[in-house]
Image: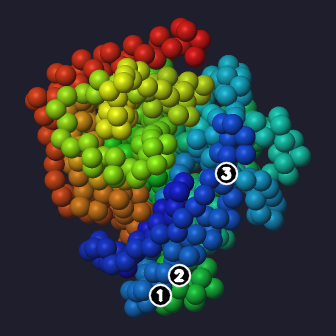
Amino acid sequence: MFIGLDIGTSSVKAILLDEDQRLVASATADLTVERPHPSWSEQDPESWWTACQTAMDELAQSSPKEMSAVKGIGLSGHMHGATLLGADDKPLRPCILWNDGRSAQQCVELEAAEPGFLTLGGNRVMPGFTAPKLQWVRENEPDTFSKTAKVLLPKDYVRLQLTGEHVGDMSDSAGTLWLDVAKRDWSDELLNATGLTRDHMPRLVEGSESSGQLRKDLCQRWGMTSAPVVAGGGGDNAASACGVGATAPGSAFVSLGTSGVVFATNDRFSPNTESAVHAFCHAVPYTWHQMGVILSATDSLNWLAKSLGAEPSTLTGALGPVSAPSDVLFLPYLGGERTPHNDVSIRAGFYGISHETDNRALTHAVLDGVAFALKDCMEALAVAGTKVERVTAVGGGSRSKVWLEIIASLLNVVVDVPADGDFGASLGAARLGQAAAVGSTEGIFSKPPMSTSIEPRPDLTDAYAEAYARWRKLYPALKEAGF
């Protein structure tokens, strides 16, 4: 038996798999995000651990026999979160999350002062990453910075509670901007740029390797007969790739979660910093990946639903079959954007609203706008030499067939939909736990069963290509106007 724990932004998911990777049980515990100031986004690290205990307790109660036989636990989590611990391993302040924008000025200064962030780190210095967050703390909360003994990522704080060990994996750690991504090791130069050393960092392991064993008291609490190994795990997107079998070079997926991602696996470190492509280590050894990232995917639909007083599924369900792009254009930049603009200040908006515009038109525009932003990501990957012809869809938004039809037709790719698409990251985490337990990755990361494959619709491809060309003109026009 194997467990996958996914520490998401809005919830913690725990799944229990048998030896054949069949789902035995699952549990979820909700989380909340605090926004004390504009552009800030924070969470209490203790809330992750409380939610993990709640989910694990539920698994132990529903499946005690299977829990007693657990051999491996894998972790995944939202990336980039700055979790600052004192010498007693207690959090010194709330975690600064991936979608926090307060460190924009620090990004500009760090990128100018240390060119290694673009070369060794392989990525633009953006407010979402961990390094500029620490620089912000260094400048604005010097007392907290001086007391910081360790900096962990969210899933690695949970690991600390599970094992008592300070350990990180390659894929998640690449998102800090302190890693020499090609060498898969911490960079002293990049750490020094933010006033830190290796002593502040966790020990590194590959995602499929063991990082330690579950504490004895937790084994007793959850009824495990022997202490399972806890795998290195991965950042949420790398773990999702492991869950959908996108671990071989050339494989890819698209994620429609809170944020949106186009993910492509590579056999080498392949940065494209000019288009704000993320180039990270994968969660499996000797493998890297590229990502185009948009900050508001299902977040855009959820915002619209909240504004209209409706459920997201009700809005998309009322849309019906799509025969052409929406007449209304939507920019999904609710909290700025990463790929390809790296712009923390740009904001979302509609264009083309008329007297006839109704809820259906607005919903259609939001789905289109997110798809257009994903097309931007695909174009940025193409500049870096990556060609994608087929993707697997994961995330909550993948439950909308009409959204996937739009994406398939616009990106001109086949979209495969897993039977259990909502468990992408937690499934990948469980698979990494299995690999660590058996000591091999052989045969672990196959594609899961697919419920359907969505082909590009010939009646939509040309129309969406034209609509995308119009949509792309909005961002430079807005920037020229001072927005």
Helix, strand or loop at label 3? It is loop
Residue type beneath disc 1 = Gln
- Color style of the picture: rainbow
Vertical relation: 445 (above or below) 114: below
Residue type beneath disc 2 = Asp
Residue type beneath disc 3 = Glu
- Quarter holding the N terminus is bottom left
How crowded pointer 2 is (Cα within 10 Å; few <14, some 14-19, many 20+) is rated as some
Mark 1, residue position: 61
The answer to whether 405 appears left or right of 144 in the picture is left
Can residue 299 be seen in the rendering of this structure?
no
- Residue 236 vs residue 184, the one in the foreground: 236
Which of the two discs, 1 and 3, labels the residue nearer the N terminus?
Answer: 3
Helix, strand or loop at label 1? It is helix
Helix, strand or loop at label 2? It is helix
- Residue 57 vs residue 471, the one in the foreground: 471
- The structure residue drawn at horizontal position 73% and vertical position 45%, both measured from the top left corner, is 36
- The structure residue drawn at horizontal position 63% and vertical position 40%, both measured from the top left corner, is 100
Give residue 132's position: percent from left, percent from top.
68, 35
Mark 2, residue position: 57
Give the numbered dot on residue 355: none
